[in-house]
Image (cartoon, grey):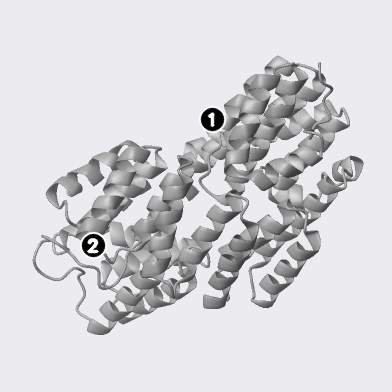
Amino acid sequence: MKRGMWLAIAALVVIAAGVTLVALPRGPEWTTSSPEALEEFEAGMEAQMKLYHGEAKEHFDRAYELDSDFRMAKLLHTDYLRGDNKELAKQLFEEVLAADTSNLTPREQFFIERARAYRDERSEDIPKIVDEYVARYPNDPYILNQKALGTWQSGEFEEAERLYQRLIEISPNWVIAYNQLGYITMTQGRFAEAEEYFKSYRFIAPDQANPHDSLGELFITLGRYNEAEETLEKAIEIKSDFWASYQHLALMKAFTGDIEGTRAIIERAKAAEMSEQMVLGLDCLARYAELAQKEAWQQILDERESGCIKGFKEGFAAVTTHLAASRLGEWEVAQAIEDEAAEILKKLEEYGDEKKTMVLAGAINHMEGVRLAIQGDLLGAEERLRAADKRLTFVEAGTGWYKLYNRMFLVETLLAEGKDAEAHQLLSKVRGVNPTMVAEFEDAGLKVLGLERS
């Protein structure tokens, strides 16, 4: 079973207990003979809405234990089970899809029919299935949410925004919609609107970690680092194992040069029992941020066979190693890193992961631009860096920063070409987003690559 299909199933239900439903089919919302199983299932849905996945797993597991015929509980139990027992998860998944659905609610039939399409790799049928159910049950927030999520992931931002606003109208307690609206507007660079959505989300759900984390991501992108740290720490205070906030804090400190602060965050994450793989990712971030800060290009290149490269071939360590190779004129190494990233891109395209595909395609364009600029092909570099800018968005803090840094590489390239007016116009755009980042770039003489001006 392809990993992309599992990821799609994992996103089937992002829901909240106690939402207000309007004009839905009469009768029970979920099909189970056990009130106890239903209670656990609804608790799992509430945890999933909060993005508390550990708690959601426990509730869905318990719901399935209480009623093994509860099809939706079994489906979600199966999704979480795959990390522990892939074969059993596959068996249970097939059982869910093979059983008769005539006694289930339309909503349950929708999720199972959609899961069948993923299993059969009929990705082209998914939008049709969603649209058919939305047409029949336009006020079911569970199905409308799937329509909104699909349009957002495919880059149809205007339609996704309309659908999420509609979702709030029919189900005001569906608070995750505010989060999605915040990210939609943030992706498009509509930062003031994004801040309003995230703050509305925080106002409605102040006791949840994710509203604080999302607002923190926006503040990082905008260079409002003190505010970002305060709100991310609030998320951790609310939920000590909300790993995204540790990651965002570490990212912010690493990219602003506070390596000691980055390592302190990592130690806190370890103490809170973050997974070894996540900790490795943060350790690699700290390591390569420090080496890049010192411009230790040869040392970076010497560590090319490290676990940071092998474990995260398309990540920050790989991009930093590519920069080191280019700065040292090791063109075969730089090209090999680009080629490895291109292979990963092909696999992502097969999985249909459009978000990651866009980011990695942008990263490849960026690396090509860096190599060409240092080789002296400034026109070619400009073309690649502009292509990277089109693909990279402000969808999250890490990608947003990547987009801004890519623009500063492009500024330096334009200056080297003698296109000063274009360079300063672009620099002004970056300053309008993150003035702190531009101030640091100016202190460095508007140079990252060390290009000579014409």
Residue beneath label 2, please? Answer: 171
Please tell me which residue is depicted at 61% across the width and 49% down the height of the picture. 398
Say what secondary structure mark 1 lies in.
helix
Q: Nearer the viewer, residue 361 or 416?
A: 416
In the rendered image of this protein, does residue 67 appear above or below residue 336?
below
Could you say which quadrant of the image residue 365 lies in? top right
Alpha carbon of mark 1 to alpha carbon of mark 2: how far? 35 Å
In the rendered image of this protein, does residue 159 appear above or below residue 312?
above
Give me the disc on residue 390.
1
* Left or right, residue 45 beside residue 132: right
The reply to whether residue 339 is in sight is no
Q: Amino acid at mark 2?
A: Ser
On-image quarter of the C terminus: top right
Label 1 crowding class (10 Å Cα cut-off): few <14, some 14-19, many 20+? Answer: few
Please tell me which residue is depicted at 20% across the width and 67% down the height of the picture. 20
* Left or right, residue 451 beside residue 279: right
Please tell me which residue is depicted at 61% across the width and 37% down the height of the picture. 430
Please tell me which residue is depicted at 66% across the width and 31% down the height of the picture. 366
Q: Position of residue 287 (x, y in %)?
A: 80, 55
The reply to whether residue 42 is in sight is yes
